[in-house]
Amino acid sequence: MLKGLAIENYALIESLRVEWDEHLNIITGETGAGKSILLGALGLLLGAKNEGQALKESSRNCVVEASFDIDGLGLEALFEENDIDYEPQIEVRRIITPAGKSRAFIGDMPVQLSVLRELGAHLVDIHSQHQNMILQSEEFRIKALDILAENGTTLTQYTSSLAALNTLRSQYRELKGSLEEARKEEEWLRYTVEELRAANLKDGEKSEVEQQLSVAESADRINEILVGLRNALDNEEMGAIATLTRSQRELNALDGKYADGVTLATRIRSVVEELKDISATAADEQERIECDPEKLQKLSDRLNTIYSLEIKHRAESYDDLLAKREEYSQRLATIDNSDAELNALQSKMNECEAECRAIAGRLHDARAAICKDVERRMVDMLITLGIEDARFCVELKELDTLTATGYDSVAFLFSANKTSAPAPIERIASGGELSRVMLVLKVMLAEHMKLPTIIFDEIDTGVSGRIASAMGDIIAKLSARIQVIDITHLPQVAAKRGAHFVVFKEQGLSNIRRLTDKERIDEIAKMLSGSTITDAARKQAKILLE
């Protein structure tokens, strides 16, 4: 429930604050006084876009703030999802800076406008005059029928299932499209994969072949150096091993005369053993490394093959070439497995669509079950509102395709007289008839929604006299269940029991105040007789109020 509203520096409003009655609030005022500005500020608070005309004075912030009683509305989960501390009484604030920046707060917590809009949808329903034309929207008609049929849970299940189906359809289209593209190069892919597989490329092979080729190309020079090394080590007279061995024996012969000689001999023996091992290794390398023209040619051919493949496939390195081989193989495997993948996706799509249709069937059955009751209640209240020959039908048709709300098409058919067959209401109803239909529909919807507050902006347009009074009675009856704020030009509606506010202009600024009982008589008398209030108008106003 909306408890209080404060507005500063918005359009023609300098500053105002108003406390609302928990049941019926009547707002009247002359045309141009600022009633629509009041609603515009409230809309801004509930997340509407700033159209750039919010600031009255461009040097100050525009601030719209309201207090709400949300106890019992079941909004705890919404607050938890958005990490906002829940309180049964909350303050909502929207600030527009001179630079056009917008800031929003729930309590002391800054929030995004999307959160403000989501919360606002649970707090206030604003029905303005132009919304009578919303009956032209099939989306609105289906939504209204679903609210009356209490289809919320089933509709959530359907939306989730439809989202899954659309995801599968998107995956199917993408896979099919990529396969069509892949098939255009299938022949090239097969040739390329076969070529790379035939090359039998192995990890690290290129560097290994390059090393082997380098050795093979220098085999003569390597062997020449190895022969020289062995001669230097193994010559019987002048070789390093023979020379050191003699020195070792001579040092050992000094045992008892030169104590450190044994130590030196031991170290020389270690060196000799290492030199013998080097000589043996050089001999093995001589046998391994030989100038083999056939081997040299094979290594050269293998390296040329690798280089050619890298150039052909524009590989930046040998590892990149291996990666391309894997990529081409996977693309070819995708083509080879395409039928199986598409069939699997098609099967999942069929299952998901069957589930969607089953849920859509439950939505259809629930809508069909409520239609007669909606038609009966609509006609009963329209007769009360002066359309004595009213006929109202809910036409529910099944479509072949699934839509966002199932497979139903919903039309509201209406006739105001016996001689005319019911036709789509948006084509046949007058402005006054649309106002009455929308009022009845809003009353019915309010019984099923948890909205605590509804605002009617001249929903009584196009009616007068007894019918206006009947509309006022319905609005007053509705206010016993939820808070109603009704902007009206009709004295019959303004006279219904509740708080009466008047919007007025003073020195070019819009303001609002609650009327006393005496002031209310004068305001309704003015609505009856015009700017000059007569005694007869006051008397009639008292009668209306009584």
Image: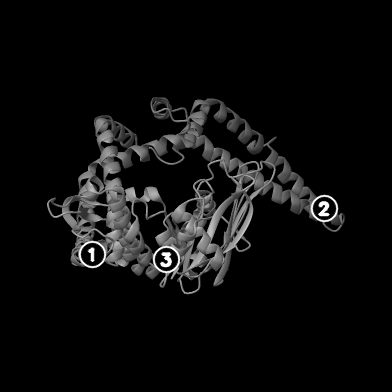
Residue 518 is left or right of residue 482, and the answer is right
The tag earlier along the polypeptide, 1 or 2, is 2
Q: CA distance from mark 1 to mark 2?
A: 122 Å
Q: What amino acid is labelled 2 in the image?
A: Gly
Residue 534 vs 96, above or below: the answer is: below
Whichever of labels 1 and 3 marks the residue nearer the N terminus, that label is: 1
Q: Position of residue 69 (x, y in %)?
A: 53, 70
Look at 64% across and 41% down and name the residue there.
Answer: 99
Query: Which residue is farthest right?
Result: 257
Q: Is residue 445 above or below residue 94?
A: below
Q: Disc 1 marks which amino acid? A: Val
Q: Amino acid at mark 3?
A: Leu
Percent coordinates x, y for residue 359 in the rendering: 23, 62
Choose the circle earlier in sequence order: 2 or 3. 2
In front of the other: label 2 or label 3? Answer: 3
Mark 2 residue element: helix
Query: Is residue 100 among the parts visible in the rendering?
Result: yes
Mark 1 or 2, closer to the camera: 1
Report the disc number at residue 544: 3
Question: Residue 374, labelled with which disc?
Answer: 1
